Amino acid sequence: MADTDKPLLIKRYASRRLYNTETSDYVTLEDIAGFIRAGREVQIVDLKSGDDLTRQYLLQIVAEHEAKGENVLPINLLTDLVRSYTSGMQSMVPQFLQSSFDMLRESQSKMMENWQHLPNPMSGVPGFEAMRKQQEAFLKSMMGGMKGWGTSGPVPEAEDEKESPANDELAQIKKQLAELQSKLSKL
């Protein structure tokens, strides 16, 4: 079994093919991107010279994803990065970017941790309660003429109304909502 604490060593041959030393097979840039997405560190070295090519290939992976329309990096950020190479800020940019991504990772981790301890995971999201109230007000205004909507609670029904198609549909919607909330709370 591979030691996932060590970086996965990828060797680049003179033919420019990339070789996974753990599985003894050739890999593509997309394979390398998959290893990284799975949480694995990689190190890409030139077989002949021993030069570390990791940075070059990671930049190539980012460039290919950007070229496919998977725009993650805004134009302003790319422009600022180019400017940083020609200014005195070149030494500050790497530390700033690294600390920004560290903070992002940490906040994502804390959010996931907090969601596990909440009865409704969405209730921990800033602005969720306001959004819920807006949706409730919208539904009240749209459904105000229907029995049971637009009041603080359900309207008691007459005995002959219990079997109406609208009530069956409402019961199905409530059931689906409960199932969805259950699935969310498990996340």
Image: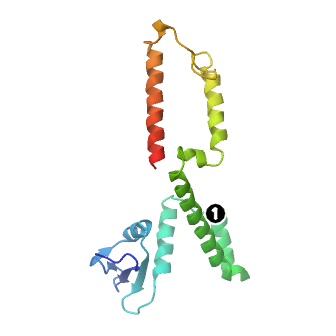
**Number of on-image labels:** 1
User: Mark 1: which secondary structure?
Assistant: helix
Name the image quarter holding the N terminus: bottom left
**In this orientation, which residue lies closer to the viewer: 17 or 122?**
122
Instruction: Tell me which amino acid carries mark 1.
Output: Ile
Residue that mark 1 sits on: 75
Q: Is residue 91 above or below residue 179?
A: below
Foreground residue, 160 or 172? 160
- Give the camera-side residue of 162 and 170: 162
Q: Position of residue 134 (x, y in %)?
A: 66, 34
Measured as percent of width and height from the top left, residue 22 is found at 30, 78
Q: Residue furthest top?
A: 160
Q: Quadrant of residue 122?
A: top right
Q: Residue at x 68, y 77 (%)?
A: 84
Q: Residue at position x 67%, y 39% from top? A: 130
**133 to the left or right of 47:** right
Residue at image point 66% right, 69% down = 79
Q: Name above or below for residue 12 compared with residue 142.
A: below
Residue drawn at x 66%, y 29% as measured from the top left:
137
In this picture, residue 24 sits left or right of residue 170: left
Circle 1 packing at 10 Å, graded few (<14), some (14-19), many (20+), is: few
Residue 94: percent from left, percent from top: 62, 77
In the rendered image, the vertical position of residue 167 relative to residue 10, given as above or below: above
Quarter of the image holding residue 50? bottom left
Residue 97 coordinates in the image, percent (x, y): 62, 72
Looking at the image, the residue that sits furthest to the bottom is: 49
Q: Quadrant of residue 103?
A: bottom right
